[in-house]
Amino acid sequence: MAKEQGRKLVASNRKARHDYLIEDTFEAGIALTGTEVKSLRMGRASLLDGYAVFYGDELWLEGVHIPEYSGGTWTNHTPRRRRKLLLHRVELAKIARKSQESGHTIVPLALYFKDGRAKVEIALAKGKKAYDKRQALREREATRETQRALHSRGRAE
């Protein structure tokens, strides 16, 4: 069997980009059981309630829902168990230092396979206020309107 190449997206957390101001992103490996990997290969996962937290000097992913594998037996995993993130010690120290600052959290942005290995993209993020979210929506709508106007004007001439 040929080795997998490239990146295959399983799940993304689009709401995190709306709710948080993303400051820095990291790619981390994730320690999974066999049935979790099979369930991910079927494209089933949810990152909506996910977050990462330090226990000691290790980073753990919590709240991520990977449903049970339908072909699994008694060896099936629990859907919302705590999963260990695999990062270099230097990256862990950087994340720990920044996450101690007020208002910062660690959220998962995407879960994917890269060259056959399960990876998660985590972000060091700061929560947005309600007025920041509204302003971002206004800016996006304004750019969309200008693009429509430019596109229709170019077509009319």
Image: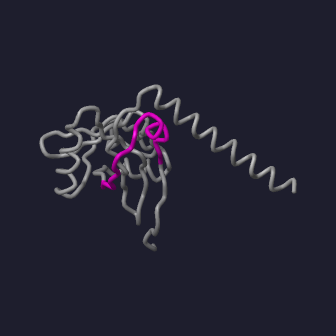
Q: In this rendering, is residue 138 above or below 155?
A: above
Give the residue displayed 45% in from the left and 68% down from the top: 4
- Horizontally, is 21 left or right of 133 in the view? left
Q: Nearer the viewer, residue 107 or 85?
A: 107
Q: Quadrant of residue 60?
A: top left
Task: Measuring from the top left, give residue 116's x and y in whole percent.
Answer: 40, 63
Identify the residue at the far bottom of this view: 2
Q: In this rendering, is residue 138 above or below 91?
A: above
Q: Nearer the viewer, residue 37 or 120?
A: 120
Give the residue displayed 29% in from the left and 37% down from the top: 105
- Horizontally, is 153 left or right of 111 in the view? right
- Horizontally, is 13 left or right of 124 in the view? right
Query: Which quarter of the figure is the N terminus placed in?
Result: bottom left
Q: Specify the segment rendered in magenta.
A: 11-29
Q: Nearer the viewer, residue 68 or 149?
A: 149
Identify the residue at the far top of this view: 130
- Total of numbered circles in the picture? 0
Task: Measuring from the top left, give residue 41's x and y in whole percent.
Answer: 46, 53
Give the residue displayed 41% in from the left and 45% down from the top: 109
Task: Measuring from the top left, give residue 36's x and y in whole percent.
Answer: 37, 47
